[in-house]
Amino acid sequence: MEIETMQYLHQPGGSCACVAWSGVFKIHGVNLSESDVFGLGSGIYFGYCAVGSTKLFDVSLTSSSIVNDLFLNTGVYGKLFQVSNGHKCLDLIFESIDRGFPVAIELNPYYCDGLMDLTPSDLHQFLPAHWVVATDYNIVKGTIIIYDNRQFNPIEISIDRFIKGRETGLFDQNPRNSFFNIFFFDKLYPLDVSIQLSLRKASLNFLGVEKILSFYTGEYGFDKCERQIKLWDSFFKDEIQLKQLLQKIRISITGAGGVKGGYRYLFSRYLLRASDVLENSRFVDISDIFKESAEYWTKFSDKLNEYSIDTRHNYWGTSSELSLLIRKIKELEIKGFTEISKIIN
Amino acid sequence: MYTCHNFSFCVSEYIASKYNLLIDEHICFILGSSLNLQLSLKNRNQYNDIKPDLLKLDSYFLESNNPLAIENFSSNINAVFRIDQNNDLNDIIWIASDYLNLNNMKTIVQISSDILSEDRGKYFNPLYATVYFPNLTNEDLVLEKLQEELISVSLTNKTEILINCKDFFRYWNVKDNELYNSNRYVVIPPLYRDFENSLPKIVKNSLIRQYYYLTEKDGWTGPRLIKRLRDNVKYDSSEANINRHVSLLKTSIECKNTLSYNDMDRFYASQSFRILFDKNIINEREIVDVLESCGRCWIACYDKLNTQSIDINLILDIYNDLYEKESMIIDSLYKIMSSWK
């Protein structure tokens, strides 16, 4: 049977999840950009993790529930399933493609060649599961067509490799055959309502919450991070391990190198949209705050990289600069969310 | 009148047992944006489309649970939400381990309504449960021993079932049945600076999501669903179609009755909103009485279906009454939201 090829419009971008779901929403007739998806998913976040006994340190700048929140804030029905069998999951993906809808799914990053090529090999271990969009398949050739956020052209991957990429990997690299069953009603929630829901949730995260899992959040998290950066080197006897830690954090805050400004440029653009939809120009000023914060995050990320590759720097100097950057970022972002909270609450 | 709510009880119990965080189950109801009225397929295939087909009314029942309650709850309180499914056997060890090693932590799962002994409860979906092994000792954390143990399955404050672990698998086993989206849920609430102080903002988001869930969805929820059903029976007033509507209403109400009351959870919702009002989280009390009145309307509907002779006028009267009462819920919710402006 001849099935009409899906007219999938791929717009590359920095955040794999946001690019993937932006593409899926567009096919369903809802035009959301990468920054819209990030904002509507209440994606902006700050968390600092420090477990000295296991030398586990991390900085996280995106929410782990961005996709769920995207659905709940927009009124799209979306329920996450873990399909017990890889082939069964594949059938579901094919079924959706046959109906003309692409499928956003996660793959073990080791099975995403483009991502592997762009990331130094010693950092592959730090990459989480990677969002791609499956748009077509060929049973005769045994291949699936996927789109990756960092590349313009589609990628052909063998079905066997795809199945392996869906159910292998350690910890958060393993997608475990997860699959979102989604349904778009003809009418979603009004956009102003969705934006307010998303901003209220993000504000609460920054201003009301102190800890999620092992991550210290909000002002408390920033303070802890600022103080403890200077102590990281004391936990590692080997400087290589310290450099690896800094690179791991850089991977985390740049979305494996694809996202600039700690995701704050995305949030800044979202706030401009909020300004239009909510007809409130105060969001423009707040957008500028997060744009400034994004510049500091870029410097932070560059500093992490600089120390890792240039042996002339000592950690004492680097850590002082990193701490100062965190303090400036904290002042901006807490101020930004305090202003947002005043408007929407 | 004492009423129960399966989802609210289970989430409240789970959070309390694992995190020592006491959130009243009625508040959990609100935070799950749980109030609902929609058509759901009886033999729920997890991959079915959402828009019902009124030509196949026999295949549906009226659901008063929100199938996204646990997702809503987690999102509204900024919790981490995960679904977990190892294989069934490892998941059982996980449940036992949670209880033994994590200070009596209970696990929250979804379970087949077949576990309810009464036939009329069998369409109760989703059915949540908090489970644990009440008689475990440290030596029992081995699969062969666990399968001989009793497992406690709590559905509400009033309903706890003790069954053999091997039997538990018949109601919980995902592998062949594929009815549920995972074996276990994990909801990890964050630590708030001051949870009580943040609660009004959390409730605000929950109620906004609640309102739009009931009023959007292309008219397949809330009072507009009742209107569709009413229009359907006006369009086709044949005996066969009237019987389908009677069966739909009776089955749906009886289904709720197995665990709670035949009021489609409106009394429980009323109690929940009363708590919000008493805590000064909402300023409008009208919804408390509106929900109670709606609950009485559902009870009256059931009584009429069982005691009066069935004809088109009776069905239309019932739908007219339900439409009026369910619409008042929407109006009351809107008033609450307006009072925030």
Image (cartoon, coloured by chain):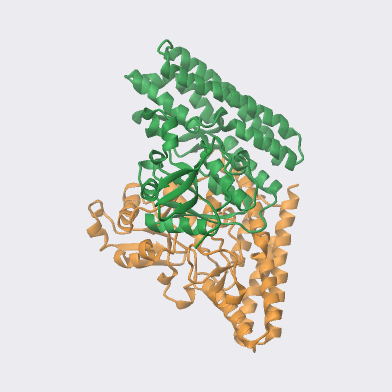
On the image, the x and y values in percent for residue B26 come to 56, 57
Residue B166 visible in the shown view: yes
Q: Residue at x 54, y 31 (%)?
A: A259
On the image, the x and y values in percent for residue B240 come to 61, 86
* B223, A43: nearer the viewer: A43
On the image, the x and y values in percent for residue B100 come to 31, 50
Return the residue found at the far top. A312
Q: Colour of chain B?
A: orange
Q: Colour of chain A?
A: green
Residue A198 lies in quadrant: top right
* A151, A326: nearer the viewer: A151
Return the residue found at the far bottom. B309
Q: Residue at x 46, y 17 (%)?
A: A306
Answer above or below: position of A331 versus B142: above
Answer above or below: position of A19 versus B52: above
Counting the numbered discs, the total is 0
Left or right: A207 with respect to B325?
left
Q: Residue at x 51, y 45 (%)?
A: B79
Residue B108 visible in the shown view: no
